[in-house]
Amino acid sequence: MILTLAISVLPSLAQIGHNLGDAAEWTIGIQAVYGTRDNRPGVGIHFKTQYLDSWRSTVSGNYYFKKDGVSCYDVNLEGNYIFDLSDKVRLYPLVGGRLAFW
């Protein structure tokens, strides 16, 4: 397995959301990304949900622009459990996976 790093240039370029009361809330947005393995920029879309103030999940997909005649896209799934350390500080371990296609 080859690990690659995709850096989110901005948290999101545009984002909308909806609060579903105490149960959950969600946001959807677009993002700029940069793939460090092949040095190529790209764009992506993400869908984030938060449940019960402690659980959060994200599904995202990114498209990396053509370089040397080859384009790439990936699909990501991640989950977090949020620990509130104070009113301004949160700690959340990240668990997830990525599928990349060339």
Image (spheres, rainbow, N blue to C red):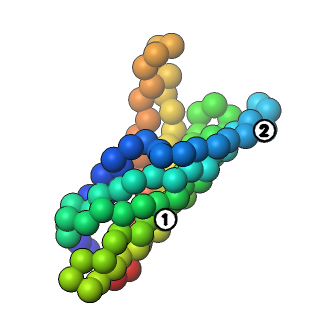
Q: In this figure, which residue is indicated by the disc labeled 1?
A: 61
At x 46% / y 16%, what residue is drawn? Answer: 88
Q: Amino acid at mark 1?
A: Gly
Q: Residue furthest bottom?
A: 69
Mark 1 neighbour density, 10 Å: few (under 14) some (14–19) many (20 or more): some
With 12 as the anchor, is 41 left or right in this view? left
Q: Amino acid at mark 2?
A: Leu
Q: Of marks 1 and 2, which one's residue comes earlier in the chain?
A: 2
Mark 2 neighbour density, 10 Å: few (under 14) some (14–19) many (20 or more): few
User: In this orientation, which residue lies closer to the viewer: 99 or 28?
Assistant: 28
Say the numbered circle drawn on residue 89: none
In which quadrant of the rendered view does residue 3 lie? bottom left
- Residue 49, position in %: x, y? 63, 46
Q: Residue furthest top?
A: 87
Asked if residue 16 shows in the view, the reply is yes
Q: Residue furthest right?
A: 21
- Residue 76, position in %: x, y? 46, 63
User: In this orientation, which residue lies closer to the viewer: 54 or 62?
Assistant: 62
At x 59% / y 40%, what residue is drawn? Answer: 55
At x 24% / y 77%, what residue is drawn? Answer: 67
Q: Report the mark closest to the observer, 1 or 2.
A: 1
Q: In this figure, which residue is indicated by the disc labeled 2?
A: 20
Q: Which SS class for mark 2?
A: loop
